[in-house]
Image (cartoon, grey):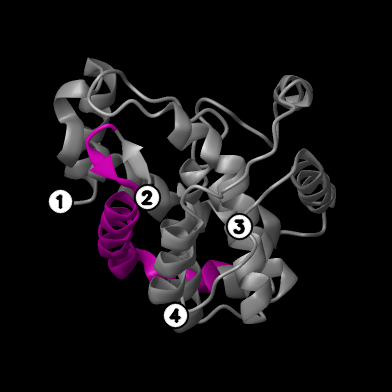
Amino acid sequence: MKPYAYNDQLLFDHLKNTLNFAQQFIQQNANISCRRFKASGLNIDLHRFKFLARVAALTHDIGKGADQYQRKQNIGKEKPTFMYHELPSAIISWRLLEKVGISKEERLLVFMGVLQHHNAMRDWLQDENLLQKLNRFRQPWTFSMCIDEINKFLDEEIGYTEVLDTSLRDIFELIKYVKECLSKIRLAWPKLYCLLMAPVVIGDNLDAYKVRANDLSYAKRWFIEELKIAIGD
């Protein structure tokens, strides 16, 4: 079974489209980002930055493939809901990069970039009420329905597969660690996760506009049209 990102779009198509749009933005801004990383004490060169951004783009919505989301999909009849999908997506990105051998600092940057790509609606690093609400979200994220397709996609696009199932404990432990890093005044690098989040947010929104512009609210269409002008698309 192939997972869907929306009623009329396969998840893997959305992830690849997001990556393509993100790469256009990265092409223009990667050198600036690398200089910022270096100034903060992280040796992330152009090649490494592009790889980290690739993983972030290709995993930012991978959590939508979880059973509880795909089971509720009613293709062509109603809009699906993917509430909190960014949580398993962020955990999966962390696990993949850990398997690759990427440093903990770089894994955290990608994790935060994926975790926060909907921070306009759900800010996991600032809104304590969100974590309290999550305590009532008892259901773990399992991927038995689409596991073969997702692993094949990850292997083809990133070169690795990893455990997909995610628990609340996994989420709370990593978010706690991230907040500890962000609270240390002398550490400048954790705050630079936005340099990896920005390409994901841009790619995600541009693909949404391309595929389902008529389904978007006026405010979101206006935002994306302004975004396209800003990045010269």
Q: Indicate the amino acid at tag 3.
A: Ile
Q: Which residues are magenta?
A: 7-36
According to the image, label 4 marks what residue? Answer: 46
Q: Indicate the amino acid at tag 4.
A: Leu
Which secondary structure lies at badge 1? loop
According to the image, label 2 marks what residue? Answer: 1
Question: Is tag 1's residue or tag 4's residue first in the polypeptide sequence?
Answer: 4
Q: Quadrant of residue 142?
A: top right
Callouts 3 and 4 close, C-beta under 8 Å: no
Crowd rating for badge 1 (residues with CA inside 10 Å; few <14, some 14–19, many 20+): few
Residue placed at 39% from the left, 70% from the top?
30
Chief secondary structure of the magenta portion: helix
According to the image, label 1 marks what residue? Answer: 233
Q: Which mark is residue 92?
A: 3
Of the residues tagged 3 and 4, which is closer to the observer? 3
Q: Indicate the amino acid at tag 1.
A: Asp
**Vertically, is 195 above or below 28?**
above
Q: Which mark is residue 161?
A: none
